[in-house]
Image: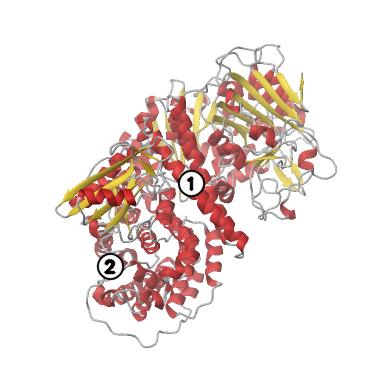
Amino acid sequence: MPILAGLALAAAPAGAAQAGDPTLRDRFAIGSQGGALCEVQATVRDRVVAGMFDRAWLILCRDASQPVGTVRMLRASPDAARERIERGRADTINCPAPDACTVKGSDVAWRTRIESDGDTSYTVEGFAAYGDALDLALESIRQRRIVPGVIEVATTSVGGDDSFARTLAGTVDLDKALAEGYRRNHSGDYADAAEFFEALSRRAEEESGVTGLDPTEFTLNRALQKSNLGQFAEAERLFTEAEAVPTSDPVQLRLRRNFRAIHALNQQDYDAAATILQTPIAPLANPIETDGASVTLTPQIAAGLNSGGAGVVQQAADSERLTPAERATIIDAQATHLLGVVERLRGDAAAAKAAQLKGLSDALAVREGRVTSIIRLRSQMLGELAMSEEDLGDEAGADARFRGSVALLAAEYPETTALASARARYAAFLARHGREDEALAIYHDVVTALAGSQRALTGMANRMAPYYRLLAARAATDRQAIADFFVASQIQVRPGVADTQAVLARELSSGSDDGARLFRQATNLDRDIERARIEDARLAQLPATPEIAALRADLKTRLDNLGFQQAETLARLSAFPQFRVVAPGTLGLADLQAVLRPDEAYLKMLVVGDAVYAMLAGPADAQLWQADIGAADLEGAVDKIRATISTVEGGQRVTYPFDAATARALYAQLFGPVADRLPTIAHLIFEPDGAMLRLPINLLITSDQGLADYQRRLADPAADPFDMREIAWLGRTVRPSTSVSALAFRNARQAAPSRAAHQYFGLGQNQPVTGTLPSLGSRGGVPGTMDDDCQWSLAQWSRPISADELRIASSAMKGDAAALLTGSAFTDTAVRTRADLDQYRIIHFATHGLVTAPRPSCPARPALVTSFGDANSDGLLTFQEIYDLKIDADLVILSACDTAGAATVAATREAGISQGGGNALDGLVRAFVGAGGRSVIASHWPAPDDFDATKRLIGGLFAVRQGESVADALWATQQRLMDDRLTSHPYYWAGFAIVGDGAQALLHNGGTTTAAAAEVAGGHAGG
């Protein structure tokens, strides 16, 4: 995680985050449900009928990619106002009666409201389903204050405002979007800011001629936000792109220097940061003296401050203008501040303090310190001064500086991530000096605020670390400390599959076919819109030609149509009350315990910095502790264990004698306080973190039983080091399943089960390919992004997995409850176009999984191998294609290699998913959850073929009686492999894990039978 973030020198309109007269402000939030669901954003004069309206605001709500309504302030009577509105609709609204309007061509209700105040009329119109937002927006404008109220509108999201930010950035005027991007950076919402600057980059080509803004400014700011988010490779690419545009502007050069230095600091490269900051830049000539008048920066000046563009500066009023010399002074003051940060981190507190004092003095010298855009910078300077004074032993001075830093942000940026971060930094100071109760109170308020607004602790992990340490230290005597820890842990960033599970749970909560259908339609439209935006961004990078221009024009039309379809869908979805509530971002400990069964416990891990914590919650009790191993050593231990299970040497997959000593030591280090209890828990729901996302918990060794004998036998060269039958694995007695978040687990457990008519569908055994591949496609890549070096080899298709385990599974079903798709019929096109996938409770793939890239330099795009089909086939069912499937499965079984692995951020975005990616479980598991799978059985390493291990393991699942759980079924078949000398090594039995609720029944509608399933193999029905 970055150690320093949000130091962009940028400006936002004064008072943008303060209460006041909304008619004089560019934007304000309305609604109070789970954070602001809607925002009101000022726009220029109406674009349809120019000059018709005196003032207009757009109403934008979460999940809707276009405005849901418009507020206007008109100097007209109510009748004249209504006439103007109707003339401005361009025949898009059908009104057979004044109060019975609908969107033309649909039955979606449209609402208009007009309020008169003297010679001014206040009007609002928009989708009737967003009536709460329409009314609050109108009243806020009319009453010249933000009117409190709750908005109940349909929403598909469960947290995160990235898509909301993209909608705002793409909708409002360019200069306002620029200022909003800066405001979100100052607020500490770096992901939102990155979305703004990315959207602005796409718009710059069309609109820069009108506004005079420098497009390289957007790229430079995007680079900074990516660095602040820890996405260093992408940040480096964007910095290089911006720096490829030559400039001699002294202000622009200073800005590039500072952002580059922040990038180095975020990567803890202090020497590089110092070198960058000390590189001379020519001073500005002919500085212009100014008076001491207070200044509030307009968006144009904000742009000038960051880009140095003289044309931009000339657009501002004289009283607001910052001269180039003033801008350079502020940016140089920031550079001095950054150099002070470097000195402190390198251990020279005195030099750090001197630099911070000079930087603060230089910044305050501009306009006597009344430049409102540097409030965030001043707050950070005070925070750094406090750190230096603390290092010098001046505790009282440091305390005052910290409080000053917090006070600045509390006044200018209340209820923001930036304020939460500053408060957490002060709390950490209090904790270091023994003022633990004060620190805990501040931390608790920070967590409450972040959880209430559904924000994650992005970039704040180090500052929150003392909170977790304090809670763990008090846990033995203070039950509330455990509950507080549990809530706080949930706002750490989790794998993206957690969000996907939460969205699926919302879909399944509909209680009706129509509600579920509309919800799925809305989420699919979200992804279609995101994919169209990604394609537009790709086309924008290509040389401008008439063909490219035509493609982009078509995309713009498509985006407009998709946005309107999405708004219509959400309006219809509002008829279902359960979708008008935003799911809470966190779960209380008591809420989790309420869904645990008597023989269950929830084991949660949390990695913060180098500290590793664990918490065990049963139905009526809970324990919390800090593990006796750090995060770095945990990574090393997991790597050592995995290296003895499956590793590649000389191009060959190799398995070594298992590292039992490390597995035994790791169990004690991680779970010492509950080491004796864990083996007694029948069903253990395990939420891993850090390196344990890559390792099944069941292969840890719980005691020395059998271990000493095994180690003694290894001294005999004739002994079989793979014979581990006597080892006390945790999986000997415990049936584990994997959770990605407590909230996702609770929601999955409460979700309605599949309503599929049939029990089982097995797919696999692709048709072998000899000679050359029948397709020249990109095999799962995006056209134009993969060269020949990144193609998969022919071998991936020439050695199909046998369908034996599919036949074993299907033979356990009664009558026509099962179907198979194998051989040449098992193509990617056949799977994608199949209309009955949602009619099977269990979907089982037995094929090769391609999760890692063909070569390290290639992008990883997870996929399952299929047979080749028609001309549209590439022999792969890709991450994106899986996500687009429509299934209604209680269980998806992925009997393939490494299916619990990650998908890259790029592959995730290509599928139209704006968040997550890059973590274990974010690959094929996430894709099948997104398609509608409640639980997934996936593999942590290549599925072994030796001794028929995988066929016996997965095929044996279906030997269970009706009603037995998935966890029981997997545990029983693992026992059989554990007890077999040939397959007792964990490579053979431990690789598959249940992601989801393992307590659900595997078979619902009958036990075993000898009836044959229907099979399509090679295009023909077979046995």
From what the image shows, is residue 265 above or below residue 869?
Answer: below
Residue 874's disc is none
Rendered residue at 38%/48% (across/down)? 67
Tell me the quadrant of the picture where the C terminus can be found.
Answer: top right
Residue at the spot of label 1: 561
191 left or right of 646 in image: left
Residue at the spot of label 2: 372
Residue lying at the far bottom of the rendered structure: 286
Q: Position of residue 607 (x, y in %)?
A: 47, 45
Asked if residue 501 shows in the view, the reply is no
From what the image shows, is residue 883 above or below residue 4?
Answer: above
* Residue type, numbered disc 1: Asn
Q: Residues within 10 Å of mark 2 (few under 14, many from 20)?
A: some
Between 970 and 129, the one lying in front of the other is: 129
Secondary-structure class at tag 1 = helix
Cα distance in 3D space between marks 1 and 2: 40 Å
* Picture quadrant of residue 659: top right
